[in-house]
Image (cartoon, helix red, strand yellow):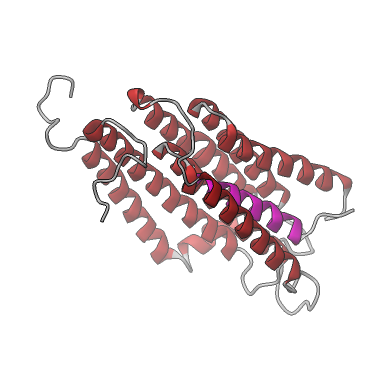
Amino acid sequence: MSVDLEHYLMVGAILFAIGLFMALSKRNFVGVLMGIELMFNAANLTLISFSRFVESVNPIDGHVFVLFVVTVAAAEAAVALAIAVLLYRVRGTVNVDEINLLRW
Amino acid sequence: MEDTGTVVAFWTLAIMTIGSALMVAIVRNLIHAVVFLVLSFMGVAGLYITLSADFVGVAQILIYSGAISILVIFAIVLTPQAGRDNAETSMRLPAAILAVLVATMLGYAAVETAWIKCGETARLPCFPDAEGFDGTAQAIGNALLDKYILPFEIAAALMLVAMLGAIIIVRAEGTEGTAEE
């Protein structure tokens, strides 16, 4: 029994699906954000797996790319959670199905 | 990766990661969900380390398990009347169906594609290469300050803008000058 690239890709796919489910269905804005963080993690895990298992011209590029993704994810989380706090202050709720100011 | 330690570590960490991610979606209390989210991030960090990605694994623990989870907890406690409920909207069933379909599609693609694995052609290098492995930090540092210097600087500017943006958003107009500020 051995562990190969496909095992890691399956873990990444399942993690991505759980994150997608949360991002699409959670009522609380913070829950949606947690789903998005899980999806970031799944993508990063896939990048690192390819960096480890697949031949490439420059294998360390996968690691560098993951670090940039983590940077952007941290910036995204900071701004999105600031928006959540502002939404709560202005509207008194962070439930995404009650925030319909911009609907068509 | 055939040695028993790696196999046991992989299955333990994979079950821990996916199990905690499922618990994040299932538990009803948002604070409990964050605790399971941290556990899931830790599992992913462990998977990075089984993939010889030591620097990224440590960065994962520092940034995700440390910083981002604290940020999420702050967002929860700063919205006190909004409830700790982790419920779903009416989109629950379509979202679940879509998530299962996406997982099936990604899994099928992962298994069916003929990836050029390490050692199959031996025309291109692999990481870590055969003669040994002394950490990825030096290679990542060299790449960041040589080949990826422009993205590195743009990322620095992005962090600054995001930090300023978060501060400006939270102290929006209408709240300035009030006593509690």
Image coordinates of residue A59 in percent, x first then y, are 64, 66
Q: Residue furthest left?
A: B177
- The residue that appears at 75% across and 65% down in the rendered structure is B111
Q: Quadrant of residue A80?
A: top left
Image coordinates of residue A22 in percent, x first then y, are 52, 44
**Residue A79 magenta:** no
Image coordinates of residue B118 in percent, x first then y, are 76, 69
Placement of B42 over or under A102, stated as above or below: above
Q: Quadrant of residue B178?
A: top left
- The residue that appears at 48% across and 45% down in the rendered structure is A25
Left or right of A7: which side holds A75? Answer: left
Left or right of B111: which side holds A21? Answer: left
Q: Residue furthest top?
A: B179
**Which region of the structure is painted magenta?**
A6-22
Left or right of B12: which side holds B101? Answer: left
Image coordinates of residue B12 in percent, x first then y, are 77, 40
- The residue that appears at 53% across and 51% down in the rendered structure is B94
In this view, the residue in front, A24 or B89, is B89
**Residue A18 magenta:** yes
Left or right of B130: which side holds A92? Answer: left
Instruction: Tell me if I can see residue A38 in this picture.
Output: no
Instruction: Tell me if I can see residue A93 in this picture.
Output: yes
Look at the magenta stretch and give its main secondary structure.
helix
In this view, the residue in front, B156 or B42, is B42
Q: Quadrant of residue A60?
A: bottom right
Q: Quadrant of the N terminus of chain B?
A: bottom right
Count the marks: how many?
Answer: 0
- The residue that appears at 38% across and 56% down in the rendered structure is B155
In this view, the residue in front, B21 or B147, is B21
Placement of B127 over or under B2, stated as above or below: below
